Image (tube, rainbow, N blue to C red):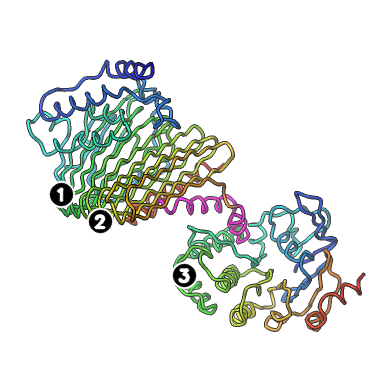
């Protein structure tokens, strides 16, 4: 009981200064989220789901200060990609810096503007997938987000978008504490790529709910900012209908604390969901990928591919689960989590899980932790490749399986260039 | 070209002396072969010359055109013109063979202060040289040595040699794991690279490789030393009589 009381006290302190508008469809959704949140309280480090990552700095009342960071040594990621740019500064949409959000087959609205209406398509999505994702594992920070999100985008896709929608985050205040909530609804046969990049705030809590209808395709490529002092918790909740496709890739370089959760439900038949991440950390770096994939439909395929390169005491965490429900026959589930430890100070903590209630399925998982292959390093050097370059080649090779999850070759090349830049800057 | 003088080498981790005073002199354009029983130190010699970790040189020197090899990093030795064809070529998942070759060629050029090869020029040269070794486009695209058969791996070594154009080539049991046809193909690849300015040190257990790659000089190595040196006929002698007689002669 003492634990439950502590969670409630922490919640009361955290939300004391927060409020939301109770009107409109959004007010109702927020009210429901607050009820969920109140029943759970905030997570503590003694929670099983937070065993490897201390949530204290994510739940504390005031966001810990974080220095601003400007990358002037390389062009911003996705710079060369033709896209619709939508900019958020410390969690607030900035129309002046954004493109006109006009894109054929795509409707884009601001959460802060659309919430007061009585009815809206997003009623069926906002907080809905988040609520589904609270079982069997509680995710209070996502419920906190649904309750108090200050802004976000509501994106409805009815056709095949001709270019990506690109969410660009800008960090402008050392104490900003941003809560953003995006909803993306892809109607039957629709297709959209969403890009995300940039340092968002000193502390960032983001939820994205994605509903992928029959035969629709959703691609998500994210590059979390190089701002080192940020703390971020993000959730992506996705629901897939028949023959739907969902692919999400995240690059994380730097960050004191990042927890990325993905909660994916394959409800229809023949759906495909891939979620992948490449994280590189040096020093005071803690990165946590927590993934939960539920197979409920027939003949669905899911892949989880997570790779981490860690040095100078950096910590990587992977908690990944595949749940195959009764009747989800012919499921093909794959999960791999690997770390490359460049020294003996770094740490990788992994908890792979499979829970299967169907008898005709194929599920595999693997988790490894290792050092640079000295034999391969010598082989490269014996051909004249200098030691550092050889090490860089091997690190990129290690990450290749995760990067291969990006379908668009130009975007994949851009991500590779970021990694090469990071390796060059952290070459010691 | 390659001068090895009184080379003594022990294992770094334990007190085990492997090379006990090797002397060897290879002139420009010459092909030397080293034969010897298992454990005689042949492969250790190739590793020490190319700079692999785990060995400690306790005495002696090895110079390439007067430059002391033993003080250089492996990549510096490569840039100076040394090449080791591995007995067991290493698989490197995730690194494309083509990327690997181009990175190596350009790293060596850069180290020597030469201009890097353009992508187009590189592609043209690599295709042409791969063709003579019967290495197809698919093999060039695949990750380095991953899923290659024994013969493909050895052909890939020779392709690297052809691309890097070293002056001193060491072939460490290049015939191991090869069938007759593959051995012929690999040997043709090596022979095509023979020239006045390029020398070879061929390490092998068996005489049959030397039917294809004809040596000028044959050395017999045993117990960390070269115990006998002669012409190609020495290899035939070993083939017929084994090493026992030679070892007895020395002892």
- Cα separation between marks 1 and 2: 17 Å
What residue did someone put label 1 on?
Answer: A187
Q: Position of residue A319 (x, y in %)?
A: 41, 39
Asked whether A75 or B70 is in front, the reply is B70
Q: Position of residue A147 (x, y in %)?
A: 22, 26
Left or right of residue A108: residue A292 = right
Image quarter where the C terminus of chain A lies is top right
> Looking at the picture, does residue A177 appear above or below residue A306?
above
Chain letter of the residue beneath label 3 in the structure image = B
Q: Position of residue A139 (x, y in %)?
A: 31, 31
What residue did someone put label 3 on?
Answer: B123
Using the rendered image, report if marks 1 and 2 lie on a common chain: yes
Q: Residues within 10 Å of mark 1 (few under 14, many from 20)?
A: some
Q: Residues within 10 Å of mark 3 (few under 14, many from 20)?
A: few
Q: Which span is picked out in magenta? A: A374-402
What residue did someone put label 2 on?
Answer: A270
């Amino acid at each position: 009981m003492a634990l439950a009381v502590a969670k409630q006290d922490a919640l009361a302190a955290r939300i004391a200064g927060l409020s939301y508008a109770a009107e409109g469809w959004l007010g109702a959704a927020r009210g429901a989220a607050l009820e969920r949140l109140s029943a759970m309280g905030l997570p503590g480090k003694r929670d099983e789901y937070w065993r490897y990552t201390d949530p204290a700095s994510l739940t504390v009342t005031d966001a810990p200060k974080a220095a601003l960071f400007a990358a002037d040594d390389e062009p911003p990621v996705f710079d060369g990609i033709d896209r619709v740019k939508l900019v958020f500064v410390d969690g607030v949409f900035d129309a002046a810096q954004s493109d006109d959000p006009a894109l054929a087959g795509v409707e884009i609205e601001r959460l802060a503007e659309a919430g007061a209406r009585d009815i809206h398509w997003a009623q069926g999505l906002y907080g809905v997938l988040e609520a589904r994702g609270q079982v069997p594992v509680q995710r209070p920070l996502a419920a906190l987000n649904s309750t108090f999100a200050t802004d976000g985008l509501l994106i409805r896709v009815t056709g095949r978008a001709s270019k990506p929608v690109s969410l660009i985050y800008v960090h402008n205040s050392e104490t900003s504490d941003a809560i953003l909530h995006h909803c993306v609804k892809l109607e039957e046969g629709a297709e959209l790529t969403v890009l995300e990049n940039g340092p968002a705030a000193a502390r960032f809590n983001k939820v994205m709910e994605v509903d992928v209808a029959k035969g629709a395709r959703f691609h998500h490529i994210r590059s979390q900012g190089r701002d080192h002092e940020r703390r971020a918790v993000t959730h992506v909740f996705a629901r897939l209908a028949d023959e739907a496709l969902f692919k999400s890739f995240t690059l994380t370089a730097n960050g004191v604390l990042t927890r990325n959760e993905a909660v994916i439900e394959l409800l229809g038949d023949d759906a495909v969901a891939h979620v992948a991440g490449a994280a590189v950390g040096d020093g005071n770096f803690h990165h946590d990928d927590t993934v939960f994939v539920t197979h409920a439909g027939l003949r669905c395929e899911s892949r989880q591919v997570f790779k981490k390169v860690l040095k100078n005491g950096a910590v990587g965490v992977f908690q990944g689960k595949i749940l195959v429900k009764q009747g989800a026959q012919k499921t093909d589930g794959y999960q791999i989590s690997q770390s490359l430890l460049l020294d003996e100070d770094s740490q990788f903590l992994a908890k792979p899980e499979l829970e299967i209630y169907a008898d005709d399925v194929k599920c595999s998982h693997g988790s490894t932790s290792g050092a640079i292959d000295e034999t391969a390093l010598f082989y490269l050097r014996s051909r004249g490749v200098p030691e550092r370059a050889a090490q860089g080649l091997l690190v990129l090779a290690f990450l290749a399986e995760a990067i291969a999850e990006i379908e668009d070759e130009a975007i994949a090349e851009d991500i590779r260039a970021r990694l090469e830049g990071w390796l060059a800057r952290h070459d010691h | 070209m390659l001068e090895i003088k009184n080379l003594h080498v022990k294992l770094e981790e334990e007190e085990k002396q492997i090379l006990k005073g090797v002397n060897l002199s290879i002139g420009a354009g010459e092909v030397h072969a080293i034969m010897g029983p298992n454990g005689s130190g042949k492969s250790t010699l190739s590793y020490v010359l190319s700079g692999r970790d785990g060995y400690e040189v306790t005495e002696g020197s090895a110079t390439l055109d007067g430059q002391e090899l033993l003080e250089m990093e492996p990549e510096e030795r490569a840039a100076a013109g040394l090449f080791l064809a591995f007995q067991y070529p290493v698989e490197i998942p995730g690194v494309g063979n083509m990327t690997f070759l181009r990175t190596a060629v350009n790293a060596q050029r850069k180290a020597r202060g030469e201009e890097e090869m353009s992508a187009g020029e590189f592609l043209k040269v690599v295709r042409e040289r791969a063709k003579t070794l019967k290495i197809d486009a698919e093999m060039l695209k695949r990750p380095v040595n991953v899923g290659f058969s024994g013969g493909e791996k050895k052909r890939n070594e020779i392709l690297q040699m052809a691309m890097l154009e070293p002056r001193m080539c060491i072939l460490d049991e290049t015939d191991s794991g090869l069938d007759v046809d593959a051995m012929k193909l690999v040997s043709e690849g090596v022979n095509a690279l023979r020239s006045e300015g390029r020398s070879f040190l061929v390490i092998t257990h068996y005489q049959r490789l030397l039917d294809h790659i004809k040596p000028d000089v044959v050395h017999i190595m045993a117990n960390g030393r070269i115990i006998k040196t002669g012409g190609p006929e020495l290899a035939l002698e070993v083939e017929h009589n084994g090493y026992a007689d030679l070892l007895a002669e020395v002892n």
